[in-house]
Amino acid sequence: MKDKIISIGFLLLIFSLGIIQIFTKDQEVSQIERRKLVTIEEVKEDFTATLDSYLSDQIPFRNTFLKLNQIWNREILGNKEHNNTYKKKDFLIEKLYPLNEKSKNNFINQINKISQKYLKENHSFIAIIPDKSYFLENSFTLKLNYQKLYQELKDNINLNWLSLEQTFTLKDYFKTDIHLKQEAYFKIIETLKQSFELEDVKTTYIPKSLANFKGTSFYKLPFNNEEELTFFESPATKNAIVKHLEYQDDLVYDLEKQKSSDMYNIFLSGPSSLIEIINPDSLNQNELIIFRDSFASSLAPLLIPYYHKITLIDLRYIQMDYVANLVDFTNKDVLFLYSTLMVNNSFILKA
């Protein structure tokens, strides 16, 4: 009798979920998984290939079930890791392990290829920002041998090395995002000034904060708090002329992006293959070229007062051969700024 009751209850649950699904509008995006969901329109186009995914993606109360699964794994079973993410003192830390040796070697080769072909006469430096796993104890989980990784990069990349691995602490990062807070970059401005022999510039930075920031890691574990995203305005950021290769956005801080799925995109309007930032008030003709990933989006605004022009190149979205037709490297300062995340996933670079 007990088994019959359980079976009937289960069937009623499945039937009820099916009825609810029929009358519920499809969700197009999963914030928790940060991906597009299969909708009924895709099922109409290819029924056999998409039906299973559609039923899974559009099941009623799906986000609730995902959160319950997270709670079960972390709080009940005691697993430290869920969705490749750990939690340390309210900081969500996405796992970076093991080291992809092929990717590391490819990263070294790609940087050296660019340096040898285009930057023989340039004042060029490279800096690698550690991901948040750097701050996990070895006893907490398996982690990269960062000391060995940094030494291999330093020994094999043919550029001047800027050591940043001891510069930052975990508190310099957002709790729910992979990125550094913008104020953390003030720690390296002096280092960059000395490395590129830049003159002091008097400027004033005014902090502005946005509430309700949910970083890219926010939904990977339950019970997280929204945080503030702070950016720093200066006369240079207000007056700068910003030009994107692909689109018409022209702001250093694009506050319309706070309404998007990733508020970090307020920095230079988010992903972009090539950006030029011109400082019309500059008292010099210095130019800086930054080869970068998304971390540099929040550093670049702080460097505007020191340069007449800054060019940001993201080789995830543009071929280097094409860049060479658009950018003049002659007598320019050059900075390669990447995170260890990119070192471990370098095959997306189009060098």
Image (cartoon, rainbow, N blue to C red):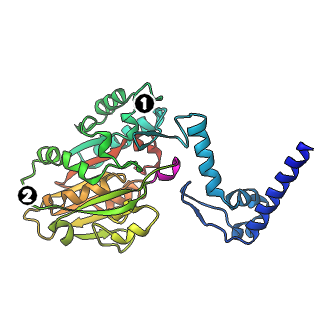
Front residue (pair 112, 15):
15
Where is residue 158 drawn, in percent x and y?
27, 37
Furthest residue toward right: 1
Nearest to N terminus: mark 1 or mark 2: 1
Q: Residue at x 14, y 46 (%)?
A: 190
Q: At label 1, which amino acid type do we have?
A: Leu
CA–CA distance in space, label 1 to label 2: 39 Å
Where is residue 328 drawn, in percent x and y?
24, 59
Label of residue 172 in the image: none
Specify the quadrant of the image occupied by residue 340.
top left
Front residue (pair 296, 202):
202
Q: How many circles with numbers are drawn on the protein?
A: 2
Front residue (pair 248, 77):
77
Label of residue 201 in the image: 2
If the image is split into quadrants, where does the N terminus sit? top right
Q: Is 326 inside the magenta-drawn segment? A: no
Front residue (pair 45, 28):
28
The magenta region covers 216-222
Q: Residues within 10 Å of mark 2 (few under 14, many from 20)?
A: few
Q: Residues within 10 Å of mark 1 (few under 14, many from 20)?
A: some
Where is residue 189 drawn, in percent x and y?
17, 49
Q: Residue at x 79, y 56 (%)?
A: 13
Specify the quadrant of the image occupied by residue 344.
top left
Q: At label 2, which amino acid type do we have?
A: Val
Residue at image mark 1: 144
